[in-house]
Amino acid sequence: MKKLLILSGITLCLFTTSCDQGFDELNTNPTAATTVNPAFLLNNAVINSSHVNTTLQYDMSIVQQTVTPNSGVLAGANFNQDNRDYTQQNWLRYFPEVIRYTKTAIDLASKDPARSNLVNMARIWQAHGFMVLTDTYGDIPYSEAGVGFIDGNTKPKYDAQEAIYKDIIKELTAASAALDASKPKENADILYQGDIAKWKKLGYSLLLRAGMRLTEVDLTLAQATVKAAFAGGVIEDNANNAVIRHNANYQNSLGSILNGTEANNYYLAAPFVNYLKSNDDPRLGSIAVRYVNAASGPQQIPANAVIDPKVQIGMPFGFDNGGIVAQAIKEGLTSFYAYSQIDKTRLAKQQAPMFLVTAGMNKLYLAEAAQRGWITGSAADYFSAGIRAHMEQMALYDERSAIPKAAIDAYIATHPLVAATALEQINTQYWVASFMNGPESFANWRRSSFPKLTPNPFPGKSIKGNFINRLTYPNSEISVNSENVQAAISRMGADDLDTKVWWDK
């Protein structure tokens, strides 16, 4: 009876004007957020910059660090084929989850002069996101990108990569210089907790990276940019690395893949393993595991796991799932499941950090800059420091990957920089130092042409040349934003894996 009376009262209220009093207050959630702290938007952009499995399927496979023998849904750089389910993933991750958030953070924070540091932090991180995108695809939406939420533009024009890079350099230069430690601290920042000195180093580190990208296409601008970055001060210590830290709630995408459905499908590539092994590089012991005598995926268990560098065997290119069986037997393995892999319990664990900009990478770029005569300091010293920094970085993945100081010292002593082969040595070491950061490995290999790799011999390739030079645009973009896509294609070249980006000469 009480329930009936209550319901009758509510029904009566609907027809009684007196019940309008307080209606707005009644239908307002007093705990709902009415504004968004733009620092949280920047944080979203940061954590979503952690790379997805395109880096395994294409970037790291193109530069011959990893490979899978499987076709079908895993076809990609392993067969030099265009699989748009994968080539689109950097685009679909970075535009909505990085660029959109940084653009919105800048828009909101710009309304408060006290938050100018947050504006400049977001500009710096946005520049990183745009570099990943334009390095991957070439011409992309830039000047009109990421503002559909703000101004309703859902069909942004594509800018030429040359214009993009020149504006990125301006953005990084201005934003890094404008950071001001006397302004209120952005404590919510998850990357550096609002530490302006560290953000400045990141900004100038990305400026260094942008300058080095241009060495084959605009030497004057490259030199000036690198000199400005060096003068500003870059990351030269692992404590200042730009790293995405993962946990049980936000897992490393590569770790999730390699510990999940594809645990038995990806392998360390023979060129990468052979380089480390032939040079007695202690990093191989930090990176690799081989499930000796594994005759199947289910036999890739801890009891069969060996991390000794001496027993590691990389999987060669040129074989599909059928052909690799005979090749494995030829190499004395029980099956292809016994080839070396990235250790899923260390570098590729689900909570492994993702290093995006590091002291090791920077030191090697400084070595090249010094070798070119652009900055002061010894190229040989920078080179050794870059190797050391990356070897010490191994411990930051997992304590079981730590390399003893004596082993680091011994390697550096026996691998000095030689002037006649300096650029090759520096950039081959960069190939190693950027391992697990596929977009950066792929970009610098195209820029420098080192290490010298033998083309993948698989016969079923869909490319005309020897190597993949860029990834293709998403089909969704072609269908929805076709006019602007076609304008980019007419300017840049065919939307295929052969077309080179502007700075790749």
Image (cartoon, rainbow, N blue to C red):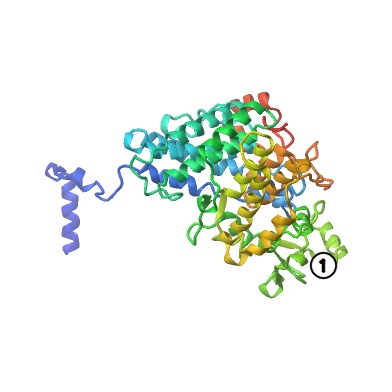
122 left or right, relative to 258: left
Q: In the picture, residue 68 is in which quadrant?
A: bottom right
Residue 147, horizontal then vertical, whole percent? 46, 32
Q: Residue drawn at (77%, 42%), measured in percent from left and top?
A: 421
Residue at the far right in the pictured view: 330
| 112 or 92, nearer to the observer | 112
Q: Residue drawn at (11%, 44%), measured in percent from left and top?
A: 18
Q: Which residue is mark 1?
A: 333
Residue 383, horizontal then vertical, whole percent? 67, 47
| 174 or 457, nearer to the observer | 174
Q: Quadrant of the N terminus?
A: bottom left
Residue 52, horizontal then vertical, whole percent? 59, 50
Q: Residue drawn at (43%, 50%), measured in percent from left and top?
A: 190
144 left or right, relative to 438: left
Q: Quadrant of the C terminus?
A: top right
159 left or right, relative to 430: left
